[in-house]
Amino acid sequence: MDSSGPLDLRCGRCGATVDGTRHTRTGYVVGYYLLRTGRTEDASVRRRDDEAPITYRRVLEPVDVVSCPRCFDEPEVRRLWLGFGDQR
Ligand SMILES: [Zn+2]
């Protein structure tokens, strides 16, 4: 069997082909970072007519953003990453 696989991930910023995480004797090398993001909107549900509606953030278009380690060090990517992880 060909083990090279159909995996063809590219960095969403610079377009470089990225490898998966490689394990070495001393640890591992992260080949790429994956950030799940997307456009969101406020949506609300009301379970019963006499209850206040619950507002939540609905993801409209989930997008997987791949970043190579070099771009991940860029401040703009770092900000996007941290901003997304900071949602409450
Ligand atoms: Zn890149």
Image (spheres, helix red, strand yellow):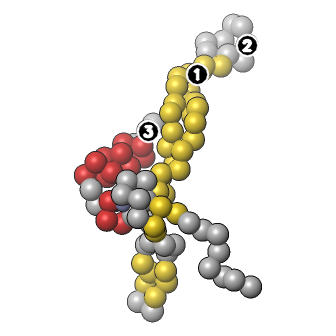
| Left or right of 16, for residue 23 | right
Q: Which mark is residue 87?
A: 3
Q: Along the line of sight, which residue is nearer the eye, 33 or 56?
A: 33
Along the polypeptide, which appears first: circle 1 or circle 3? Answer: 1
Helix, strand or loop for disc 1: strand
| Mark 2 / mark 3, whichever is N-terminal | 2
The local crowd at label 3, few if under 14, some if 14 to 19, many if 20 or more residues have their Cα within 10 Å, is: few
Please tell me whether mark 2 or mark 3 is closer to you in this view: 3
What's the residue type where badge 2 is placed? Arg
Q: Answer few, some or many: residues within 10 Å of disc 1's Cα (few below 14, many 20 plus, some between 14 and 19).
A: few
Q: Quadrant of ligand 1?
A: bottom left
Task: Read off the residue under disc 2.
Answer: 48
Foreground mark, 2 or 1, reads: 1
State yes or no: discs 2 and 3 in contact (Cβ < 8 Å): no
Question: Residue 43: which disc?
Answer: 1
Q: In the figure, 67 relative to 37: above or below?
A: below
- Picture quadrant of residue 28: bottom left
Q: Secondary structure at mark 2?
A: loop
Residue drawn at the location 53% of the way across and 50% of the way down: 64
